[in-house]
């Protein structure tokens, strides 16, 4: 089941990139969120909360990112919350929710979190660009710097693509 969820997340991320991304690395998740109609704001959240997606009836959706986190973490959190929005956006009705992104979201057991994590990885580290840099012989840490992601995230993405 997880592979089906991940495949859909990858497809949705690629579709969004095709619609709004200019093809420049690193991908700017805040600009993409704004083009998708979301507001993005930083706020000081508690240590265990990385971000949230808030959508109230009659209001534009908002992504809240923990201002205390480092740049790479904030970028991934923003992309993760875009994933939650994309997954829910096909629902016709409005909803009121906060998707709290905590360390529990990385556990890999919740379908929505699996989707959002895979979506974020595919959005920030597009397949074709990863494969191109890998073919050029760039090391994982060099790619992590170019994509503005953690080295751990890059290593995981390379492994997932069969390149690491």
Image: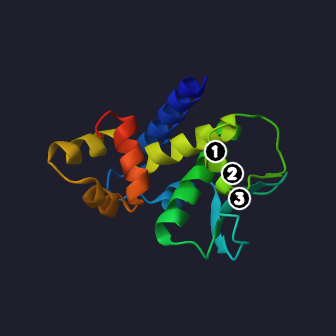
Dot 2 lies on which element? helix
Can I make out residue 126 in this image?
A: no
Closer to us: mark 2 or mark 3? 2
**Which of the numbered marks, if any, corresponds to residue 107?**
1
Q: Residue at x 75, y 34 (%)?
A: 91
Q: Nearer the viewer, residue 49 or 37?
A: 49
Q: Nearer the viewer, residue 33 or 124?
A: 124
Q: Residue at x 61, y 22 (%)?
A: 1
Q: Residue at x 65, y 63 (%)?
A: 50
Q: Are marks 2 and 1 in contact (CB under 8 Å)?
A: yes
- Give the residue number, with chain letter if any, for mark 2: 104
Residue 148 placement, left or right of 112: left
Residue 53 placement, left or right of 78: right
Q: How far is mark 2 from mark 3, CA to CA? A: 13 Å
Dot 3 lies on which element? strand
Closer to us: mark 3 or mark 1? 1
Q: Establish if 143 lies above or below 134.
A: below
Residue 143 placed where, x, y %? 28, 56
Within the image, what quadrant is residue 34 found in? bottom right
- Callout 3 environment at 10 Å: few (<14), some (14 to 19), or many (20+)? many
């Amino acid at each position: 089941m997880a592979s089906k969820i991940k495949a859909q997340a990858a497809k949705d991320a690629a579709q969004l990139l095709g619609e709004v991304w200019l093809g420049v690395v690193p991908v700017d998740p805040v600009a993409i969120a704004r083009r998708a109609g979301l507001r993005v704001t930083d706020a000081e959240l508690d240590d265990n909360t990385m971000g949230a997606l808030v959508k109230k009836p009659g209001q534009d959706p908002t992504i809240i990112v923990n201002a205390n986190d480092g740049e790479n973490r904030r970028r991934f959190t923003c992309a993760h919350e875009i994933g939650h929005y994309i997954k829910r956006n096909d629902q016709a009705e409005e909803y009121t929710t906060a998707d709290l992104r905590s360390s529990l979201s990385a556990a890999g057991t919740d379908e929505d979190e699996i989707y959002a994590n895979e979506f974020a990885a595919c959005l920030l580290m597009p397949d074709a660009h990863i494969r191109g840099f890998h073919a050029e012989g760039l090391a994982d840490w060099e790619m992590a710097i170019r994509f503005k992601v953690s080295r751990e995230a890059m290593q995981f993405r390379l492994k997932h693509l069969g390149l690491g």
